[in-house]
Image (tube, helix red, strand yellow):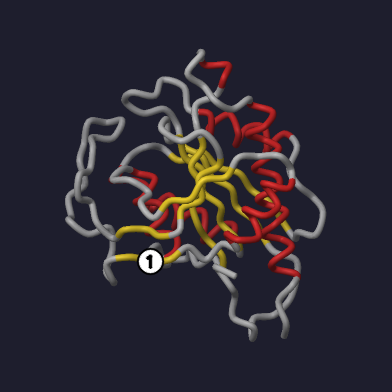
Amino acid sequence: MRGRLDSAAPIRPPRILVTGFSVFPGAPVNPTEALVFALRDAPPESGIEAFRAEVLAVEYATVAERLSAIGRDFRPDIAIHFGLASACSGFRLERSARNSHANAREDQTGCLPVDAQVCAGPETFASTLPLDLIALRLEGAGHRVEWSDDAGGYLCNTVFTLSVAHACEGFVPAMAGFVHVPLLKENGTIGTMSFDDLVSGARVATDACVEAWRGRTA
């Protein structure tokens, strides 16, 4: 299974972080921001030690320090990052993060990343989420699943890379990865997912991560 954890890690209820993004150029409405608010209002409670949901600004200059601050304050064991990809039609599970800012686009402040690489390290980093189990549980709940080996050249890939590479001081989740979601039907006829499906699918993905965490052996 992808994202298998070190079997020597202590078994205890996990601390789970879910993130989404604020609006950005070309996306005046970001469904992952609304997802964060919905999960804050009704967070998962079963089998976890603590839960937090945070909206990240679409800013290259601040995102690493924001993750560090969350890490120091919350210490997540599992980090599930959600972002918008208008080209997808279901939950797109990202297998790998590219340690590159190639083809980067301007963020919401109009800025581009300074460095060619996202962080020190290899060219790619693999997701450490239990992707196979997440896909199985999503499909079992009636949700459409897609797969990708390219998280794009924007903040989605940046956050994905920083998270799985443990490149931000204090932010060292044992399981981390990225899930893209489509536009919502409520945002117009081009949308392919309802908000209820977005929230329920995110809960399924979170539950799958808890299930994988519990399934480890000491």
Quick check: 78 above or below 203?
below
- From the top left corner, tell me how far across and down residue 214 is, in percent: 75, 70
Specify the quadrant that holds the C terminus.
bottom right
What type is the residue that disc 1 sits on? Phe
User: What residue does disc 1 label?
Assistant: 125
Q: Residues within 10 Å of mark 1 (few under 14, many from 20)?
A: some
Q: Quadrant of residue 197?
A: top right
| Vertical side of 67 occupied by 27: above or below | above
| Direction from residue 139 to residue 115 in the image, left or right | left
Q: Residue at x 58, y 16 (%)?
A: 186
**Direction top: furthest residue:** 188
Q: Position of residue 177 (x, y in %)?
A: 50, 57
Q: Position of residue 29 (x, y in %)?
A: 46, 22
**Residue 148 in view:** yes
Q: Which quadrant would the N terminus be assigned to in this image?
A: bottom right
Q: Is residue 182 above or below residue 205?
A: above
Residue at horizontal 63 percent and vertical 34 percent from the top: 198
How many callouts does the rendering have? 1
For the point 17% across and 56% down, the residue is 116
Q: Which image quadrant for residue 99?
A: bottom left
* Image position of 166 with respect to 136: above or below: below
Query: Which SS class for mark 1?
Result: strand
Can residue 76 be spotted in the picture? no
- Please state which of residues 24 and 141 is positioned toward the viewer in this rendering: 141
Residue at 45% across, 41% down: 56
Q: Is residue 110 left or right of residue 62?
A: left
